[in-house]
Amino acid sequence: MKESSLHPDWRAPKHTREAARQLRKHMTPAEEILWQRLRRNQLGWHFRRQHPLGTFIVDFYCAKARLIIEVDGPIHNKQVEYDREREAWLESHKGHRVIRFTNEEVMHDLEGVLAKIRKALEQTS
């Protein structure tokens, strides 16, 4: 979808787009592991990594399925309210869904994480 066709709230400011580029260069180990399984349509769906939506940057995004995947490290234990508000905003726009996994889930149960992602994708069809 062209940027000009997005709702004004979804246009990412230049500084957010630049921050997303930097995050793509410095992914966490858990994000890198998951990305290796999401990239190149391996699940039959196209995902983007560290993708800006409005002023937020989501870890992984499938536009066709309107699915956002977040991989949460320990910092998220200290920002529960912020994450809740951010998730509510993301889900209130265009019917997006957010699913979350911890770093530990990705690192120790990757197949289980992928099964949950596949299930979320199937619910889109």
Image (spheres, helix red, strand yellow):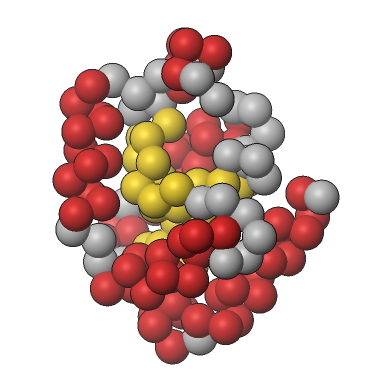
Residue in the picture at 39% in, 41% down: 51
**Position in image of residue 49 (x %, y %):** 39, 51
Which quadrant would residue 72 be assigned to in this image? bottom left
**Position in image of residue 23 (x %, y %):** 23, 50
Q: Is residue 80 visible?
A: yes
Above or below — where is 15 with respect to 123? Answer: above
Residue in the picture at 23% in, 22% down: 14
Above or below — where is 2 with respect to 46? Answer: above
Return the residue nearer the eye: 44 or 80: 44
**Position in image of residue 78 (x %, y %):** 29, 58
Which quadrant would residue 119 be assigned to in this image? bottom right
> Count the marks: how many?
0
Return the residue nearer the eye: 62 or 105: 62
Give the left or right position of residue 56, taking residue 23 as reference.
right
Give the left or right position of residue 125, taking residue 116 as reference.
right
Screen quadrant of the N terminus: top right
Above or below — where is 9 with respect to 15? Answer: above
Residue in the picture at 32% in, 68% down: 32
* The residue positioned farthest toward the bottom in the image shown: 108
Give the left or right position of residue 89, taking residue 117 as reference.
left
